[in-house]
């Protein structure tokens, strides 16, 4: 049986509520207030100390990092990921947020050479999530010295065999190419590779040039250079290459639609229909 609810009663002010307290009660409450004030002052004084850097512990070894990743293994999700990505390697089924958290902790405890060494080991494990973690370890705009990081990332490119790992590695690589645009000379050679994923990487790693709002003359020249690569790759009928060309043009059209219209007027007919439609999406 449901309980019957009664009306809420409004508290009434009574005369005795305002009656003076007995002297001994007044003295007791006054003493408590003074004691509380004194203790609070002590507390504030006690907390006036210099911030001490948190001890994050020793730098993680490769064994530590792999153990941390494997601790989050989810066999059911791993099977789903293997079926989706189709590349033959081990999958752990870890959410991207979990990888990000681990990489952030590792990065804070490692210097640049240590990050490069750990990234190399994680990549060589050929575990899907470990390879993504390897790329994320090196995804930083400011990374000095960065030559070893760039050489490692470039060495991964011929091993690409699926878009997810390739895109994370290219994001790390794009930071290094932006830091030193002279590396575009090396990237240009990728466009002539027999390995489809290497050709695709040349476009994906240079995507930051599509997002420049007020490009400087040197940056415009670099952008034109990549547009030239895209034009040379138009006859390549591989779906991933056509998609990468369309991706480059679509992103550039947000900031320089006229240049994309000109490019499509000259080279667009050679693209597959889906790529031409994707490149024109924001025009």
Image (cartoon, rainbow, N blue to C red):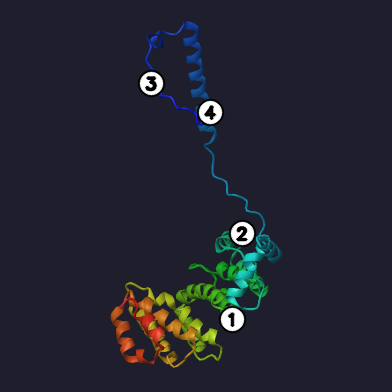
Asked if one can make out residue 188 in the rendered structure from this viewpoint, the answer is yes
Mark before the other along the chain sequence, 2 or 3: 3
Mark 3 falls on what kind of element? Answer: loop
Mark before the other along the chain sequence, 4 or 1: 4
For label 2, count other residues whose C-alpha is less than 10 Å away and answer few (under 14), some (14-19) or many (20+).
Answer: some
Q: Nearer the viewer, mark 1 or mark 3?
A: 3
Check the image and report above or below for 47 versus 222: above
Label 4 vs label 1: CA separation? 63 Å
Toward which corner of the image does residue 164 lie, by quadrant? Answer: bottom right
Mark before the other along the chain sequence, 2 or 1: 2
Label 2 vs label 3: CA separation? 60 Å
From the viewer's perspective, is 56 left or right of 63? left
Tag 2 and tag 1, C-beta contact below 8 Å: no
Check the image and report above or below for 215 versus 270: above
Mark before the other along the chain sequence, 3 or 4: 3
Mark before the other along the chain sequence, 2 or 4: 4
For label 1, count other residues whose C-alpha is less than 10 Å away and answer few (under 14), some (14-19) or many (20+).
Answer: some
* Residue 13 drawn at (x, y percent): 37, 15
Label 1 vs label 3: CA separation? 73 Å
Q: Give the residue number, with chain letter if any, for mark 2.
A: 109
- The disc label shown at residue 161, or none: 1
* Residue 193 drawn at (x, y percent): 54, 90
Tag 2 and tag 3, C-beta contact below 8 Å: no
- The disc label shown at residue 42, or none: 4
Mark 4 falls on what kind of element? Answer: helix
- Residue drawn 48% across and 77% down? 177
Mark 2 falls on what kind of element? Answer: loop
Q: Give the residue number, with chain letter if any, for mark 3.
A: 10
From the viewer's perspective, is 11 left or right of 86? left
Q: Nearer the viewer, mark 2 or mark 3?
A: 3
Quadrant assignment for the C terminus: bottom left
């Amino acid at each position: 049986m449901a309980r019957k609810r009664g009306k809420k009663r409004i508290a009434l002010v009574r005369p005795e509520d305002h009656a003076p307290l007995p002297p001994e009660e007044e003295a007791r409450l006054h003493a408590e207030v003074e004691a509380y004030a004194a203790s609070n002052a002590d507390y504030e004084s006690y907390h006036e100390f210099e911030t001490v850097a948190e001890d994050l512990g020793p730098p993680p070894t490769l064994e530590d990092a792999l153990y941390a990743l494997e601790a989050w293994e989810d066999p059911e999700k791993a099977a789903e990921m293997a079926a989706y990505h189709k590349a033959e390697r081990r999958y752990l089924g870890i959410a991207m947020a979990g990888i990000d958290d681990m990489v952030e902790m590792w990065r804070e405890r490692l210097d640049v050479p240590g990050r490069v060494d750990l990234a190399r080991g994680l990549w060589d494990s050929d575990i899907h999530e470990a390879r993504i973690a390897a790329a994320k370890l090196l995804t930083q705009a400011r990374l000095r010295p960065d030559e070893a990081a760039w050489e490692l990332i470039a060495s991964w490119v011929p091993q690409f065999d699926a878009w997810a790992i390739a895109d994370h590695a290219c994001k790390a690589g794009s930071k290094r190419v932006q830091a030193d645009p002279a590396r575009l000379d090396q990237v240009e050679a990728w466009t002539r590779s027999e390995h489809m994923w290497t050709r695709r990487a040349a476009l994906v790693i240079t995507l930051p040039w599509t997002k420049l709002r007020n490009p400087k003359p040197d940056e415009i020249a670099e952008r034109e250079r990549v547009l030239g690569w895209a034009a040379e790759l138009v006859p390549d009928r591989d779906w991933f290459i056509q998609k990468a060309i369309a991706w480059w043009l679509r992103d550039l059209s947000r900031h320089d639609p006229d240049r994309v219209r000109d490019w499509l007027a000259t080279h667009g007919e050679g693209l597959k229909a889906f790529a031409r439609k994707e490149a024109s999406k924001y025009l």
